[in-house]
Image (cartoon, grey):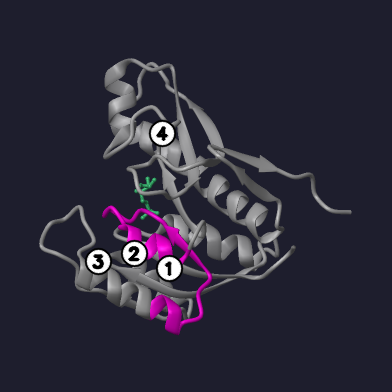
Amino acid sequence: MKTTLKLGVLGSGAGSNMQSIVDAIDRGELDAEIRLVLSDVKDAYILERAARHGIPARWIDCSPWKTRLDTTGEEEAIRLLREAGCDTVVLAGFMRIVKPRLLAAFPMRVLNIHPALLPAFPGIESWRQALDYGCKVAGVTVHFVDAGTDSGPIIVQKSVPVMEDDTPETLHARIQVQEHVAFPEALRLLSEGRLKVEGRRVRIAPPQA
Ligand code: GRF
């Protein structure tokens, strides 16, 4: 069934992925609205970007541990996302591991973008991991979030060639170009009701006429 996605976006950084979603909506390529943007980083540029687009955006106080969403932060996030009427949660460069309570609040409706071809190189700075490993191909994955780290069923992947003169920065920049294609594409498939999860596999139905 086709639906207009009501998105809540969680991010910790510049928010270029959120921008790609805003742009896809504006171009009429994605049937969605961003209801709320939350960040665990007070001065993250994603909050400013959201405000510039008139999207409600706010900082949430998370745990002092940089990589986890503690229970208080998680409950606050769930409350705010529900209040805003969100039905789908987008982790767009959110640098904390979300916990089962948030996943249970939005079952199979939490999506993450990871800058690698999973299951290779989960975790942080995966573009650097790919380069250090000597990969000739790197990439990006959009997946449903499950209780593991970067381990949920895969929706969309894009490959990115590794160039001879790549540095971590140049490779990451090239990966980000594909991130900005992959995230709106995955969300469009979701909004068009074309995703069916069968165990680890996400089946993509053909577009409806
Ligand atoms: C992206 O590379 C994303 O894959 C990673 O963090 C970065 C966030 O970028 N997890 P932005 O904040 O969307 O610009």
Q: Secondary structure at mark 2?
A: helix
Q: Which tag is nearer the camera, tag 3 or tag 2?
A: 2
Structural distance between the alpha carbons of marks 3 and 4: 23 Å
Dot 4 corresponds to which residue?
116
182 vs 58: above or below = above
Magenta stretch contains residue 97: yes
Magenta stretch contains residue 81: yes
Structural distance between the alpha carbons of marks 2 and 4: 26 Å
Instruction: Report the amino acid beneath label 1.
Output: Ala
Dot 1 corresponds to which residue?
105
Structural distance between the alpha carbons of marks 3 and 2: 17 Å
Q: Secondary structure at mark 3?
A: loop
Residue 63 position in % (x across, y down): 15, 65
Task: Using the rendered image of the protein, determine whether residue 105 is visible from the camera's viewpoint.
Answer: yes
Dot 3 corresponds to which residue?
40
Q: Which tag is nearer the camera, tag 1 or tag 4?
A: 1
Give the magenta-colored segment's residue range: 80-106
- Disc 2 residue crowd, few under 14, some 14–19, many 20+, Cα 10 Å: some
